[in-house]
Image (cartoon, helix red, strand yellow):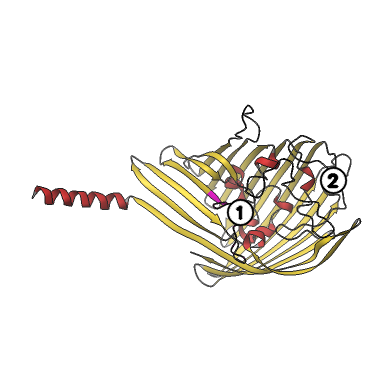
Amino acid sequence: MKRVLSGGAIAVAAVAAHAQSSVVLYGIVDVGVSYQNNAQTGRAGGHLNGASQFAMTDAHATGMSGSRWGLRGSEDLGGGLTALFVLENGFMVNSGTLAQGGAEFGRQAYVGLSSTQWGTVSAGRQYDSVVDSVQTFSAPYFAGYMSSHVGDIDNLANTNRINNAIKYTSPSFNGVKATALYSFGGVAGSQGRNQIWSLGVRYDGGPISAGAGYLNARNPNVSFYGNTPNKGLATADNLGSPGSATAPQASPAIAGYASASTLEIMGLGAAYTFGSTTVNAVATQTRFDGLGSASGPNPFGYSGNAAFTSVEIGVRHVFGPALTLGTAFDYTRRNSVDGDGGAKYMQLNLVADYSLSKRTDVYGLLALQRATGRDSLGQPAVASISGFTASATQRQVGLRVGIRHKF
């Protein structure tokens, strides 16, 4: 009888332990067809060649949500303490290849401990505090990656994650939550080289939400823009490319600033919801300080700093249970670097999203961008909608129709 009772107790304990742990498989598949005019095909002498382009593209470039699959797990350790982990893979639906530069779990990969009283500490590849605190107030949150500020200069479309990071997230106190992140540079004899740190705070209370964040990355060409398997060399330009006679330029707004010793991103955002309408506003400044350092190539001989200031306002409205319409306008200005006069970028975004069910929706996105001044490649500034091939002229139109399924 004692053996029967003992066996029963063990079985009950095993069932209870299993009930206190969970692992969830989740994901998003997002694919569509995109169109752009004036897509660069290369250059002949000082002239950029361009043509219209139709393509099937994954959402990592231009869509609503990057395609992904992930595992999220937790274990109740008792006393209000929980162990947790996230492994999240990004992939390209149209080709089946890995996204995020070929990283197996390039979107997120971390493990940590969470306390109901003290907050959460996690370690691994994670989002920075600017993304955590400000991103949901920006257009990429509801109008897709192509609606981000030129070249996603402030990372509000979350183009870049942070490797080797320890992050603390506080509990919510009357709607206020704070985060802090530190990424180890890992360079022997130089504690500060390649390090990244960020701070953020956010308030969510009823119809009003607001957030602020700051990020500081040393040697950003390697630490911030070069933290995927296909990048990372200090001798390469991980921010973009000047192109060639047969290849388009990549990120011409910032590609020339790979020699910056420090990257700083500061962001403020807010939203107000009344009824079925939400109005959002965002202001950011992104600084490439210490141009001319040994952090990366400097073919144009830049010195000093390049500072991009962006302001954005947007509105979206939910029509019934299925249809959402939205628009956003952003303006970005860069200061003069070595007397080049600076550059300006203006972009209008439109989105229509229709839900076929709770998990499946179809959508249409439109972006119109105009550039003036001179960009980082020392040329008359060209338009460059995020995710699209840079334009051969100062104007660009980007259009996408897609379908998204969540599981």
Q: Which residue type does callout 1 highlight?
A: Gly
- Residue sitting farthest toward the top: 189
Q: Return the residue at label 1.
A: 102
Assign a secondary structure to mark 1.
Answer: helix
Binning the other alpha carbons within 10 Å of mark 2 as few (below 14), some (14 to 19) or many (20 upward) gives many
Q: Which residue type does callout 2 highlight?
A: Gly
Q: Which residue is more in the foreground, 64 or 298?
A: 298
In the image, residue 69 sits, relative to residue 308, either above or below, namely below
Q: Earlier in the sequence, mark 2 or mark 1?
A: 1
Residue 106 in the magenta stretch? The answer is: yes
Assign a secondary structure to mark 2.
Answer: loop
Residue 265 visible in the picture: no
Drawn side of residue 373 relative to residue 250, left or right: right
Drawn side of residue 375 relative to residue 136, left or right: right
Which residues make up the magenta segment?
95-108
Q: Residue 117: x percent and y percent?
A: 41, 38
Gap between marks 2 and 1 measured at Cα:
34 Å
The residue sitting at 55% across, 45% down in the picture is 125
What secondary structure is the stretch in magenta mostly built from? Answer: loop
Q: Which mark is residue 342?
A: 2
